[in-house]
């Protein structure tokens, strides 16, 4: 009887049947004979192996210990080290617990010790969750798995004793398709189809079923053989379309999920059995490799027929309309609210308890409910008193935090911004802009519309006057409108009038009276420069700076520097009929226009604008401070010499010190050394705005524009600004400030060029690394010195020419030549440069005198005079532009 029972258990417990039993017996015999061979085969074996152990409540503690012994036996044959076999261990029940990962232990004895310490979980059976954890986490490179490119075999050995409580087929297929070999070991009443959905193919090599945990040790030699054999996929040219799967002594090709292997056993084709077969699944059909399985929606479970579904979670159906929580009961459900809420009469929606309505809160203005109580709150514009119930008004305008550009007006609940007359509030509700009446109204002006404070007026272009309707314009007849006083003729010009004389007369110096043409214009006087007539005779004269020669007609240049006590400390330079003082290299001319000082002793108003943004870094900020100190060393700091200010900016702008704050280099260097790093954003445009509007004002120490002191700014930045820097850079340069742009690292060249003064190439300094700051410091010191020298020389020269205080006049000489010939007289009136007289018209003046009335000579004279006149006009235009530019710089 006992023998029959034993046979029955063997028939029920072991699968596959007798063929598998014979195979196990052969393996058991082979195990004794080939133990030494297998140990050698596992030596130096490169393998990533993860055990997944079922620790559900159906596994008894005694059986759990058997599984641990099984693992320890497998470990005996493995060559465990970081370069050979790495081992990880996961146990699962209702949750997954990672006992140790592939990278945790490097020695076999440490792995064995961790296996022995493993504790029994005794809850549910989430097999699919455990396999998914192994695929996504346990076999990741961060957990110790070697990269796929190294072709190290990845193996899972899973032991389970019951039906999984979650889907396993799909996740197991994904795991196998990722190149992981799965050995599935079932113990007891495990469904063979479930094991096959987990294990790799062929099933006879990777899926095993034993009757109880005591028999699991019989598989030790089987796994020793399968694990230690050579993995052919890593050494053979398998040609598999998708995946290559190792089998003992060979390999098979495997397709991705949703594909089937073609007849050549290498290529793959798409297969969708849910579409091609009548699956009869009530809810969901899911393809598996070579088959399909039925699944149910959330809240349902599959019937025993594997196709139909029955409800197990009522709350899974859209939460049954419960606003907060749905609670399942044995045969129904009920709704429940979160803490701090109560259920409404509809038994589904929730509301907060209204503590303010239930209690006498005594709040003066507002009562606000909380989860368990309430608190008092005030309306906007009020603040809570210490009693936490009554309120008092906040005067935001008096606090100075309103941000209004013009005026702040308190209201009942808050405040509002208001603009001055002639301005309108912008969309931000704080800043103001001038009302453009001309743009906002149909002004009707024919030519020009000019805004006034409260309205507008029409104006006319130059040469026109406004009509009585105050809108249309008529061309102005200045001769008719004015008592011009012209003796002969009055001629209108574009903006005024001039007096003219009839032929044979010339205009007197008063610009109104006329007198007959003097002898100098009637005869060939031969004077080289000037002819002075008294009506009866004439004499030749020279321009200032020239002397009359003995022939009483020609002139020679007079060396003013040698003829007068010029007082120049270094060099005297003749300029036409005057002179100017200049200095040797490295020196600049002082304000008196005579004495010289070294360029670093000269007066200058200099403001540093320093980038203190986060991208700079504290270490580099210290280098920037050394850069500033280097520039200071090149200047003489005193009330009459250099005034220095410094701004630092990031998300906002901070004035470190103004132009008037320090009078000595020692105090200024101390302030630079103690300057704190801001380390936030990079608002370069905002910094340039403050520099332009405030730093160069007399209130902050800048000297008056009339003093002709150079205004210079050194702007340092290490990257792109977070606002527009070009607008305020342009305004600064228009106001007469010279800007040097210094950029390091990520600085954008386009932005530096927009900031720097013209010519840009002389005002930009850029380097990729901060180690070049010392070189930039030397270049900038030299450039500032050169520009200071040029500025002072230009200013002194203009002073000597009286161009800074008077309107420019053409430096020309008016000469009227009258060619008296026997049969005609031709009048010529030209403007000549002071040095360009008859000596250029002819190499032999005596010959010209003899043939002056010849047509050829007359034509040549006319052509020469016309050319010289055009050159003079061009030079006058260029001088006017330079004077206008200088006046603009002095004005702003």
Image: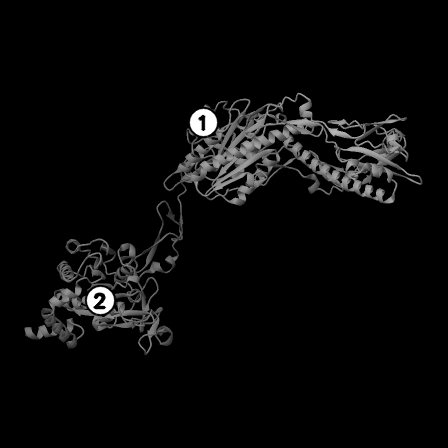
Residue 575 in which image quadrant: top right
Q: State which quarter of the image contains the N terminus.
A: bottom left
Q: Residue furthest bottom?
A: 263
Residue 404 visible in the snapshot = no
* Colouring chosen for the image of the structure: one colour
Q: How many marks?
A: 2
Residue visible at 33% across and 57% down in the picture: 333
Residue 462 in which image quadrant: top right
Residue marked by disc 2: 183
Of 133 and 277, nearer the camera is 133
Picture coordinates of residue 745, whole percent (x, y): 45, 43
In the rendered view, would you say 756 is above or below 310?
above
Along the horizontal axis of the image, is 223 left or right of 684?
left
Of 507 and 568, nearer the camera is 568
Q: Residues within 10 Å of mark 1 (few under 14, many from 20)?
A: some
Picture coordinates of residue 571, whole percent (x, y): 61, 26
Of 177 and 801, nearer the camera is 801
Q: Residues within 10 Å of mark 2 (few under 14, many from 20)?
A: many
Q: Indicate which disc, 1 or 2, sits on the residue closer to the N terminus.
A: 2
Mark drawn on residue 669: 1
Residue 443 in which image quadrant: top right
Residue 505 visible in the snapshot = yes
* Disc 1 secondary structure class: helix
Picture coordinates of residue 380, whole percent (x, y): 50, 35
* Disc 2 secondary structure class: strand
Picture coordinates of residue 753, whole percent (x, y): 55, 42
């Amino acid at each position: 009887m006992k023998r029959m029972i034993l046979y029955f258990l063997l028939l029920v417990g072991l699968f596959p049947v007798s063929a598998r039993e014979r195979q196990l017996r052969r393996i058991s015999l082979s195990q004794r004979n080939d133990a030494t061979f297998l140990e050698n085969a596992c030596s130096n074996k490169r393998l990533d192996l993860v055990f997944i152990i079922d620790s559900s409540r159906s596994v008894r503690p005694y059986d759990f210990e058997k599984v641990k012994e099984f693992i320890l036996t497998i470990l005996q044959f493995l060559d465990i080290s970081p370069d050979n076999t790495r081992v990880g261990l996961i146990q699962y029940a209702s949750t997954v617990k990672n006992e140790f990962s592939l990278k945790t232990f490097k020695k076999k004895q440490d792995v064995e010790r961790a296996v022995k310490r493993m504790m029994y979980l005794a809850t549910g059976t989430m097999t699919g969750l455990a396999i998914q954890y192994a695929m996504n986490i346990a076999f990741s490179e961060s957990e110790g798995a070697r990269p796929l490119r190294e072709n190290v075999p990845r193996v899972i050995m899973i032991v389970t004793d019951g039906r999984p409580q979650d889907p396993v087929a799909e996740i197991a297929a994904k795991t196998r398709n990722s190149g992981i070999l799965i050995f599935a070991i079932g113990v007891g009443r495990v469904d063979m189809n479930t094991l096959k959905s987990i294990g790799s193919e062929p099933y006879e090599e990777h899926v095993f079923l034993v009757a109880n945990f005591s028999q699991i040790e019989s598989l030790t030699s089987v796994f020793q053989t399968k694990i230690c054999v050579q993995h052919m996929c890593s050494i053979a040219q398998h040609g598999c379309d998708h995946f290559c799967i190792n089998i003992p002594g060979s390999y098979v090709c495997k397709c991705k999920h949703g594909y089937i292997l073609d007849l050549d056993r290498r290529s793959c084709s798409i297969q969708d059995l849910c579409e091609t077969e009548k699956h009869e699944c009530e809810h969901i059909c899911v393809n598996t490799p070579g088959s399909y399985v039925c699944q149910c929606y959330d809240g349902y479970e599959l019937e025993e027929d594997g196709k139909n579904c029955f409800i197990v979670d009522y709350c899974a159906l859209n939460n049954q309309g419960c606003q907060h929580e749905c609670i399942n009961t044995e045969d129904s459900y009920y709704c429940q609210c979160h803490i701090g809420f109560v259920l409404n009469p509809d038994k589904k929606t929730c509301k907060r308890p209204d503590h303010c309505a239930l209690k006498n809160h005594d709040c003066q203005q507002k009562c606000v409910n909380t989860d368990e109580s309430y608190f008092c709150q005030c309306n906007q514009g009020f603040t809570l008193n210490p009693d936490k119930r009554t309120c008092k008004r906040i005067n935001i305008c008096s606090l100075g935090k309103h941000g209004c550009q013009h005026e702040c007006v308190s209201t009942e609940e808050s405040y509002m911004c208001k603009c001055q007359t002639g301005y309108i509030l912008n969309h931000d509700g704080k800043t103001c802009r001038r009302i453009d009446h001309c743009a906002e109204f149909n002004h009707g002006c024919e030519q020009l519309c000019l805004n006034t404070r409260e309205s507008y007026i029409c104006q006319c272009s130059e040469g026109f006057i406004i009509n009585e309707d105050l809108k249309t314009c008529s061309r102005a007849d200045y001769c008719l409108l004015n008592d011009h006083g012209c003796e002969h003729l009055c001629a209108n010009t574009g903006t005024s009038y001039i007096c003219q004389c009839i032929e044979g007369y010339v205009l007197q110096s008063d610009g109104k009276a006329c007198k007959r043409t003097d002898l100098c214009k009637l005869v060939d006087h031969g004077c080289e420069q000037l002819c002075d007539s008294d009506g009866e005779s004439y004499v030749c004269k020279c321009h200032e700076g020239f002397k009359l020669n003995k022939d009483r007609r020609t002139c020679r240049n007079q060396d003013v520097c040698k003829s007068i006590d010029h007082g120049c400390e270094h060099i005297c330079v003749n300029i036409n009929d005057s002179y100017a003082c200049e200095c040797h290299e490295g020196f600049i001319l002082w304000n008196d226009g005579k004495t010289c000082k070294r360029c670093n002793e000269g007066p200058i108003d200099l403001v540093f604008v320093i980038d203190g943004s986060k991208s700079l870094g504290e270490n580099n900020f210290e280098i920037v401070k050394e850069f500033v100190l280097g520039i200071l060393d090149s200047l003489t700091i005193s009330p009459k010499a250099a005034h220095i200010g410094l701004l630092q900016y990031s998300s906002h702008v901070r004035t470190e010190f103004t132009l008037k704050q320090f009078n000595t280099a020692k105090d200024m260097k101390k302030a630079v050394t103690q300057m704190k790093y801001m380390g936030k954003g990079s608002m370069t445009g905002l910094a340039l705005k403050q520099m332009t509007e405030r730093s160069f004002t007399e209130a902050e120490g800048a000297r008056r524009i009339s003093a002709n002191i150079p205004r210079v700014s050194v702007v340092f930045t290490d990257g792109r600004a977070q606002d527009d820097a070009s607008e305020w850079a342009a305004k600064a340069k228009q106001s007469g400030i010279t800007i040097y742009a210094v950029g390091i690292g990520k600085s954008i060249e386009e932005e530096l060029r927009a900031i720097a003064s013209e010519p840009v190439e002389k005002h930009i300094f850029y380097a990729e690394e901060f180690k070049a700051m010392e070189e930039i410091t030397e270049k900038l010191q030299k450039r500032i010195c050169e520009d200071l020298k040029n500025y002072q020389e230009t200013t002194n020269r203009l002073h000597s020419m009286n161009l800074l205080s008077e309107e420019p006049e053409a430096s020309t000489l008016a000469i009227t030549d009258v060619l008296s010939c026997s049969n005609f007289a031709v009048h010529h009136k030209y403007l000549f440069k002071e040095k360009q007289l008859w000596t250029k018209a002819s190499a032999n003046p005596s010959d010209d005198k003899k043939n002056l009335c010849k047509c050829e000579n007359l034509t040549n004279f006319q052509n020469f005079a016309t050319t010289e006149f055009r050159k003079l006009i061009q030079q006058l235009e260029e001088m006017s532009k330079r004077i206008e530019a200088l006046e603009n710089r002095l004005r702003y």
